[in-house]
Image: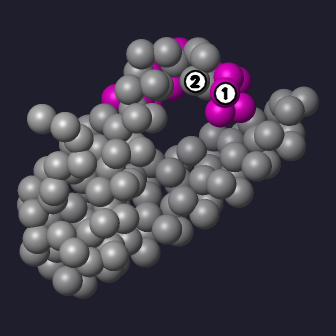
């Protein structure tokens, strides 16, 4: 996969995998580090979703649906950070979360379009050691 969109997709997949593992294995510390004041169950659910999405992004086959799923999940996280900003004393961190997740949502949506336009023909290269 020599295209810029393809390379970015592999990077996004690897980063998503890392976040998925962290959120699933250590939900409370991960939530604290990310500035979310929510319970372990929703954080673990986000982590599991990230693991599924990462698998789709890193495997062979069309990846644009997986990137679209990631953009949708990020939009949900924008709403979670916005709710946190309204109810929390840590408004600055929550607002930073809104901004960061909004940017990631736009980037993921752009990658979705780029991958879909080229019909995502090239197989994913495995960025992880065998």
The furthest residue to the front = 129
Q: Name the residue under label 1.
A: 33
Residue 30, which numbered label? Answer: 2
Q: Is mark 2 on a helix, strand or loop?
A: helix
Q: Is 119 placed left or right of 39 in the picture?
A: left
Q: Is residue 42 visible?
A: no
Say if 102 sits above or below 13 in the image: below
Residue 100, which numbered label? Answer: none
Say if 80 sits above or below 3 in the image: above
Question: Closer to the camera, 93 or 77?
Answer: 93
Question: Closer to the camera, 129 or 3?
Answer: 129
- Few, some or many residues within 10 Å of mark 1 (<14, 14–19, 20+): few
Say if 129 sits above or below 29 in the image: below
Residue 104: x and y in percent read 54, 59
**Residue 11 placement: quadrant:** bottom left
Q: Is 102 placed left or right of 26 in the picture?
A: right
Say if 35 sits above or below 86 in the image: above
Q: Can residue 81 be seen in this view?
A: yes
* Callout 1 touching callout 2 (CB < 8 Å): yes
Q: Residue at x 32, y 73 (%)?
A: 5
Q: Does the magenta-highlighted stretch encompass residue 119? A: no
Q: How far apart are marks 1 and 2 (CA)?
A: 5 Å
Q: Which residue is drawn at 36% across and 65% down?
A: 8
Q: Is 80 placed left or right of 54 in the picture?
A: right
Residue 100: x and y in percent read 65, 54
Residue 112: x and y in percent read 34, 70
Q: Magenta span covers which residues? A: 32-49
The C terminus - image quarter? top left
Q: Residue at x 15, y 59 (%)?
A: 124
């Amino acid at each position: 996969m020599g295209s810029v969109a393809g390379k970015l997709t592999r990077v996004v997949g690897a980063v998503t995998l890392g976040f998925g593992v962290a959120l699933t294995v250590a939900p409370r510390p991960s939530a604290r580090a990310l500035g979310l004041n929510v319970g372990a169950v929703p954080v673990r659910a986000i982590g599991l979703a990230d693991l599924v999405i990462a698998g789709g992004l890193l495997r062979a086959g069309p990846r644009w649906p997986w990137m679209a799923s990631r953009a949708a999940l990020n939009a949900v996280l924008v709403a979670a950070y916005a709710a946190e900003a309204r109810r929390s004393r840590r408004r600055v961190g929550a607002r930073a979360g809104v901004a960061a997740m909004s940017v990631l949502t736009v980037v993921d949506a752009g990658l979705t379009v780029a991958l879909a336009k080229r019909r995502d023909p090239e197989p994913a290269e495995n960025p992880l050691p065998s």
